[in-house]
């Protein structure tokens, strides 16, 4: 925010205040996704996932438990970033709705990670999800700069992605408090769809 940020127009306010919500969205995405990758090792290498499949555990309970663990790690990492941001002079508000959106973002990408762990066959392919899906989202979804700077075709594609709406929501909620209801609905729908899809796929493994 002190170097490159001085030359970036963020429509008023300091760049660090603009940057922190985007960093939180990006960090919570990466931590939550990568925290659930061990499910892939349990399925492919350790074969310990089979123990859960035959245990008297409901599929939805297993999925929710795994996702909740990844969400907790994402929130802990986000709390560290928030603390450091205040130390470096950032000015933003952390409201209950702000925390809810952050939690939903963690849940969405934990669910995506869970689905990837159940579908993908090799550990190298899990790395490709990071490289070809998460990495572009980290830079294009309004984390470091406004999506208005993107070409129209790219911007329309980016507007579909959940991280974009999380960045919008966190940035608006950390400031004046006004936010897009549409973005909130999109994030909630992604979270619901992810848990339903993850439970369905895990149940298919037990059939």
Image (cartoon, helix red, strand yellow):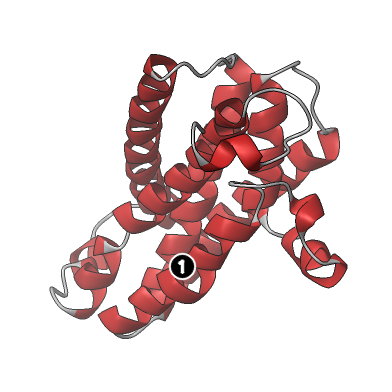
Which quarter shows the C terminus? bottom left
Left or right relative to 118: residue 153: right
Q: Quadrant of residue 182?
A: top right
Residue on which disc 1 sits: 115
* Camera sees residue 206: no
Left or right relative to 20: residue 116: left
Q: Where 109 sits versus 1, above or below?
A: below
Q: Residue furthest bottom?
A: 121
Q: Residue furthest left?
A: 46
Q: Nearer the viewer, residue 54 or 145?
A: 145
- For disc 1, the neighbor class at 10 Å (few under 14, some 14 to 19, many from 20) is many
Q: Where 87 sits versus 9, above or below?
A: above
Query: Which residue shows up at 34% across the image and 49% down it?
Result: 66
Q: Point out residue 106 in the picture as x, y percentages from the top left corner.
A: 48, 43
Query: Which residue shows up at 31% across the image and 52% down it?
Result: 35
Q: Nearer the viewer, residue 69 or 31?
A: 31
Q: Nearer the viewer, residue 63 or 98?
A: 98
Q: Point out residue 72 in the picture as x, y percentages from the top left corner.
A: 35, 35
* Camera sees residue 176: yes
Which secondary structure lies at badge 1?
Answer: helix
Q: Point out residue 129 in the picture as x, y percentages from the top left corner.
A: 44, 74
Q: Quadrant of residue 84?
A: top left
Number of numbered discs visible in the structure rendering: 1
Query: Which residue shows up at 66% across the image and 47% down it?
Result: 145
Q: Where 149 sits versus 53, above or below?
A: above
Q: Where 4 sits versus 152, above or below?
A: above
Q: Quadrant of residue 117?
A: bottom left
Q: Point out residue 185 in the picture as x, y percentages from the top left corner.
A: 77, 41
Query: Which residue shows up at 57% across the image and 38% down it?
Result: 5
């Amino acid at each position: 925010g002190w170097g490159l940020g001085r030359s970036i127009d963020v429509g008023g306010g300091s760049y660090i205040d603009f940057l922190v919500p985007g960093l939180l969205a990006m960090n919570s995405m990466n931590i939550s996704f990568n925290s659930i990758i061990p499910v892939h090792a349990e399925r492919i290498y350790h074969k310990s996932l089979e123990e859960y499949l035959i245990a008297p555990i409901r599929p939805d309970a297993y999925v929710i438990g795994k996702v909740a663990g990844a969400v907790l790690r994402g929130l802990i990492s986000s709390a560290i970033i928030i603390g450091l941001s205040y130390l470096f002079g950032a000015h933003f508000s952390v409201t209950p709705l702000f925390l809810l959106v952050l939690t939903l973002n963690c849940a969405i990408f934990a669910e995506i990670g869970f689905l990837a762990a159940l579908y993908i066959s090799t550990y190298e392919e899990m790395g490709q999800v990071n490289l070809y899906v998460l990495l572009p989202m980290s830079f294009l979804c309004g984390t470091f700069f406004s999506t208005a700077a993107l070409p129209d075709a790219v911007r329309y594609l980016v507007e579909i992605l959940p991280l974009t709406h999380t960045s919008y929501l966190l940035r608006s909620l950390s400031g004046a408090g006004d936010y897009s209801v549409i973005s909130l609905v999109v994030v909630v729908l992604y979270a619901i769809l992810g848990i339903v899809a993850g439970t369905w796929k895990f149940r298919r493994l037990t059939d």
